[in-house]
Image: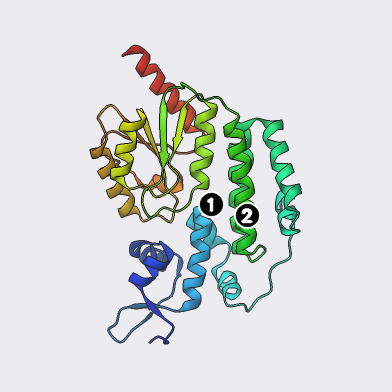
Amino acid sequence: MTNENSIGIAAVEQETGLSKDTLRVWERRYGFPKPGRDANGERAYPSDQVHLLHRIRRLMDQGARPGRIFAMGVDALEAKARGEAPAPALGGLPAEIELLRMHRIAALRSVLEQAALRDGLYEFVTATAAPLALQVGEAWARGELQVYEEHLFSEQLQSVLRGAIARLDGAGAVPRVLLSTLPGEQHGLGLLMAQAVFALEGAGCISLGTQTPVRELADAVRAEGAHIVALSASNSYPAGQLKEGVAQLRAALPPAVELWCGGAGSARLRQPAAGVRVLADLAGIREALAGWREARATA
């Protein structure tokens, strides 16, 4: 049986963005969540488990795999979610996260800017920004950072990336790439990192931000003369919704316009629709662009 604070699986799906299928698979594979049953015998999830599912989803948004998350120890995460355990002692965290925790935001911003200048934009995105975003999410899940601190970090990183992108001259660049996420996908950091790599590789980028309806994306492609649509999907975006949205968008686009999908969630497109390319990681953008240009040159 359940208590009055439990909610059904449909409500959990809507609140956390984790699909019903995902919740059932985790229950079998990892032993979490552990729903009770309501008067009708349906799954019902206590509020502390829903709170923990929010934490797990945030880690997935940063690129962590479920197996790695659950290896951290569900019991410890559950206790932290209920406020029954003190936060573990910090140790071994990157200097950037230490600065964030001490609220030295100007210093954090300076360190990120210096890294981008020192290492170059591509190396900064792939070797610094992406791993740091994952580590910040993990530190938050362990209770070492507050939600607002995670948001502070994201804002600083996005600001540095936007500044670096703005310094690149994309006027007249080919291909023209339209970037966005599908409706319901609110996470834009991965999209911005992809934009940085596209711009660095000489593509002309038109970013629409997050959650653009399929019809609007198709209209924007025609208005902007885009050659490629690049979508980003986090791990928490429902797989069924992603597949349906990608298929609808592919059908709405002109045949000559390519559709590329990246982000941790896009790995679930194991059998994408014809004319859809799945990029395994940010490094895959280089290879994909080289292939596009080669095909155009020999056409």
Give yes or no for contact between labels 2 and 1 (Cβ–Cβ under 8 Å). Answer: yes
Residue 239 in sight here: yes
Q: Residue at x 43, y 65 (%)?
A: 16
Position in image of residue 11 (x %, y %): 36, 72
Circle 1 residue? 62
Kindly state the secondary structure of the residue where label 1 is placed.
loop
Q: Residue at x 34, y 65 (%)?
A: 20
Looking at the image, residue 79 lies above or below residue 282: below
Number of the label disc, if any, that sits on residue 281: none
- Is 199 placed left or right of 11 in the picture? right
Residue that lies at the very extreme toward the top in this rendered image: 298
Looking at the image, residue 20 lies above or below residue 175: below
Residue that lies at the very extreme toward the front in this rendered image: 223
Q: Residue at x 57, y 77 (%)?
A: 82
Position in image of residue 106 (x %, y %): 74, 49
Q: Earlier in the sequence, mark 2 or mark 1?
A: 1
- Is 125 placed left or right of 90 in the picture? left
**Quadrant location of residue 31?**
bottom left
- The alpha-carbon separation of the residues under discs 2 and 1 comes to 8 Å
In depth, the one of 48 and 105 nearer the eye is: 105
Circle 2 residue? 136
Residue 282 in sight here: no
- Is 152 placed left or right of 29 in the picture? right
Position in image of residue 192 (x %, y %): 52, 41
Looking at the image, residue 211 lies above or below residue 54: above
Q: Residue at x 53, y 32 (%)?
A: 197
Tell me which amino acid carries mark 1.
Gln
Tell me which amino acid carries mark 2.
Val
- Is 253 placed left or right of 125 in the picture? left
**Numbered marks: total:** 2
In depth, the one of 128 and 121 nearer the eye is: 121
